[in-house]
Image (cartoon, rainbow, N blue to C red):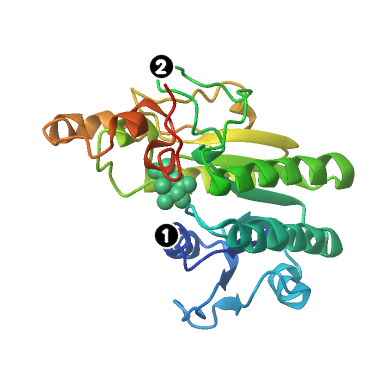
Amino acid sequence: MTKVALSGAGGNIGRVLRPQLLERGVDLRSAGGSRPLEPLVEGEDICHGDLRDPDVVDRLLQGVDVLIHLAGTSVERPLPEIIDNNLRALHEVYEGARRHGVKRILFASSNHAIGMHTVDETLGLDCEFRPDGFYGLSKVWGEAMARMYWDKHGIEGISVRIGSYQERPMEFRHLSTWLGHDDFLHMIMQVITVPSVGYLTVWGVSANTRSYWDNTGAERLGYEPTQNAEDFAAEILKQPNPLDPIAQRHHGGSFVTMDYTPQD
Ligand code: 15L
């Protein structure tokens, strides 16, 4: 049976995904970050610690086939914090994957790697990186790391540029960026079970009518989303758009206007 490790299991996405994967009978090891995880089922395989420490990485990856790597800083933060969590720790994780013969890693990238594109463009998988801050910049590093470890070390990599992972869309931007919980679980199950992928980038987005992103080229993952933010459009369109005009104009939304220099 495929042994799967889930890092960042206590975070916004991990805390939804972990019980879903356990329910599906996945042979799972979950890792928490600053706070230790409480077992959800008797005898659950869990570990804990700072992923900058190779001993912690060894405990996470011993005997693992597939790593779902969600750990790291997931919002805009000062550069030193981003470097520690999203660059240094990520490098330790990939080196650990080499030591332990991990076959495949899902890297949780983000739409903020391309957030400075404007919303009049629908982006394909080969679009230019246009990060909207240090967090987005760290995801460019992560995607390149995933690519390098496939090219140099044969570790399969799937970089998922996650949109807005929410139970349901909450605001106008989400009509384009929403990633529903069912669709992401389906994507993760594809990552665990698909026979071979090599290296692949994929948009982590549901089948939204107004999607900013086009997954043409990622078919070999077998990701077939069924959720569509448009089902919530009537309700959302009654509410004011919470974003300022510059944020509304860019894929990255509110991340774009953090520490932003206005231009004419
Ligand atoms: C992300 O990458 C963030 O982790 C999350 O907090 C949201 O801001 C999301 O992107 C988004 O763009 O909606």
**Are circles 2 and 1 on residues that touch, CB within 8 Å?**
no
Residue type at numbered disc 2: Asp
Percent across and percent down for residue 184 are 46, 45
The answer to whether 214 is drawn above or below residue 14 in the figure is above
Q: Measuring 40% from the left and 34% from the top, which residue is drawn there?
A: 206
Percent across and percent down for residue 131 are 56, 37
Determine crowd level at label 2: few under 14, some 14-19, many 20+ residues with C-alpha closer than 10 A. few
Q: Nearer the viewer, mark 2 or mark 1?
A: 2
Q: Measuring 21% from the left and 35% from the top, which residue is drawn there?
A: 241
Quadrant in which residue 87 is drawn: bottom right
Answer yes or no: disc 1 within 8 Å of ligand 1.
Answer: yes
As rendered, which of 165 and 219 lies closer to the eye?
165
Left or right of 197 in this view: 189: left
Determine crowd level at label 1: few under 14, some 14-19, many 20+ residues with C-alpha closer than 10 A. few
Residue type at numbered disc 1: Asn
Label 2 vs label 1: CA separation? 29 Å
Q: Earlier in the sequence, mark 2 or mark 1?
A: 1
Q: Which mark is residue 12?
A: 1
Question: What residue is pinned by disc 2?
Answer: 120
The answer to whether 155 is drawn above or below residue 240 in the figure is below
